Amino acid sequence: MIKRIIFLLLLVMPLMAVAQQDKAKFGYVSYRQLYLMMPEYTVAQQNMDSLRVKFDAEIARSEKEFQEKFAEFLQGQKDFPANILLKRQKELQDLMEKGIAFRQEVQKLLAEAEAELLSEVGKQLQDALNAVGTEKNYMFILNTDDNAVPFINATFGEDATEWVKQKLQVVGAEE
């Protein structure tokens, strides 16, 4: 008798798993598409562009200063005594090194600023994905960017883009 009960349980368990699988669904979205549609992303990009313009202006100013000093050096190098010539060469070398260091610092600062500005955008998108996943009772939401998921069976998965856009209060369908 116990063997029959165990046998029936073993027989019924795969059927229960199949029944559960029919209820299991997942969503899919293009993370990049949603990210680029967000107004917060546009604002972050505008802030980055403004910051780049300011840094570019400062780089141009320092390059102009270097070029002017270099032109002065070239014009007067024949007439300079050796110690003034060495001093001017040292000044030019220092200006060039400072310019290179500043460019490197600018690249670092821009990367940090971009990461900081975009982290909030990413957090908002992740919160929207979490909310939609919970509301729609998805097992998971796939990111279809870069052809990461070449096939999705519509029986089990559904495009969650519109629900995420509603959560983000995004209008339009930019690509």
Image (cartoon, rainbow, N blue to C red):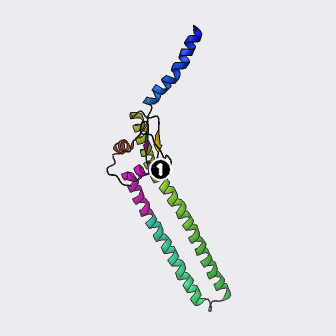
Q: Quadrant of residue 28?
A: top left
Viewport quadrant of the C terminus: bottom left
Residue type marked 1? Asp
Spot occupied by residue 32 in the image (x, y as percentages of width and height) = 44, 51
Viewport quadrant of the N terminus: top right
**Residue beneath label 1, please?**
145
Q: Looking at this view, is 159 or 96 the one in front?
A: 159
Residue at image x 43%, y 34%?
Answer: 25
Residue at image x 46%, y 47%?
Answer: 144
Q: Quadrant of residue 22?
A: top left
Q: Looking at this view, is 39 or 36 the one in front?
A: 36
Main secondary structure found in the magenta portion: helix
Give, as a single range, the part of the protein colored magenta.
Answer: 28-51
Residue 44 on the magenta segment: yes
Q: Residues within 10 Å of mark 1 (few under 14, many from 20)?
A: some
Residue at image x 50%, y 78%?
Answer: 64
Residue at image x 39%, y 34%?
Answer: 136
Side of 77 relative to 45 (left or right): right
Spot occupied by residue 157 in the image (x, y as percentages of width and height) = 43, 38
Q: Looking at this view, is 23 or 61 the one in front?
A: 23
Q: Looking at this view, is 4 or 58 the one in front?
A: 4
